[in-house]
Image: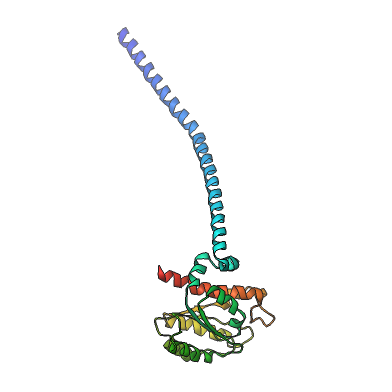
Amino acid sequence: MKKSRQWAVIGAAAVVAVVVVITGIIWINHATAPTSSGTTAAKSSQVQKITNKQVTAGDKRRLRKERAADPVFAKYERYGLTYAESQYAHNMAVSMVGDSLTVGSEYGFKEIFPKINLDAQVGRQATAGPAILSAWANQGQLAHTVIVELGTNGRITADLVAQIERICGAKRRIFWVGVNAVGREWESDDNALMRKMARKYSNLTFVNWYAASQAHEDWFNDDAVHPNAKGQKYFFTFVAKSVLKPTIAAQK
């Protein structure tokens, strides 16, 4: 009996010793885990910082090369033009008819779109548009992409839009620049009509210059209609991007 009790005591002590050892191991692992995780996180953060620096340096080198290769991109990047857009625009045929807003920004449109066919005139009414577009179509000079900047000097009608649609045909893409003509009663009516027409004709896109320029009085001359030297750059770059973005996307 004594030996049995002795062995029982020894067995119990061994069990306790094993439990103590296991508990100690678990406690040590638990205590050291956060430190290990923290060290790993710190190393990861350092690696990420280095990687970010490398990417930034790479981006800078790429931008320098792109600017050197494309002076138009270098000139209008600050106004929102991307390198891809500028490159695509170099070989893109465009036909554009406009009024005095286009006259003031003609140089910019011709820089971004070297192959543009452009006809703009001060004081031009929207009703003059169909004849110009029709003449280009008859001569085989009407491009697949057509920009219409008319409406500054008078109302646009649904019949006029329908006439231009017939001349251009469903296969051409038409981009109609909205009106920003402060103090002229037809401004909101013209823009509302063009939004409606864009829903009606799948090949017509309303380029909302009114919305894009509302918060920028410093872009305009005293008449609040015609962009000044600064505003012209934002105007033709905005129109160009509005044309290029969906056009490039359609090619993918």
The furthest residue to the top: 2
Image x and y of residue 247, in percent: 45, 73
Image quarter of residue 137:
bottom left
Q: Nearer the viewer, residue 2 or 171?
A: 171
Image x and y of residue 207, in percent: 52, 77
Q: Nearer the viewer, residue 76 or 194?
A: 76
Q: Against 74, is 14 above or below?
A: above
One can see residue 211 in this view: no
What coloring was used for the rendering? rainbow
* Quadrant where the N terminus is found in the figure: top left
Image x and y of residue 230, in percent: 65, 73
The furthest residue to the right: 222
Image x and y of residue 9, in percent: 36, 13
Which residue is pictured at 43% across the width and 69% down the height? 249
Left or right position of 185 against 27: right
Q: Nearer the viewer, residue 221 or 186?
A: 221
Q: Against 193, is 55 above or below?
A: above
Left or right position of 199 against 187: left
Q: How many marks?
A: 0
Which residue is pictured at 42% across the width and 88% down the height? 166
One can see residue 75 in this view: yes
* Quadrant where the C terminus is found in the figure: bottom left
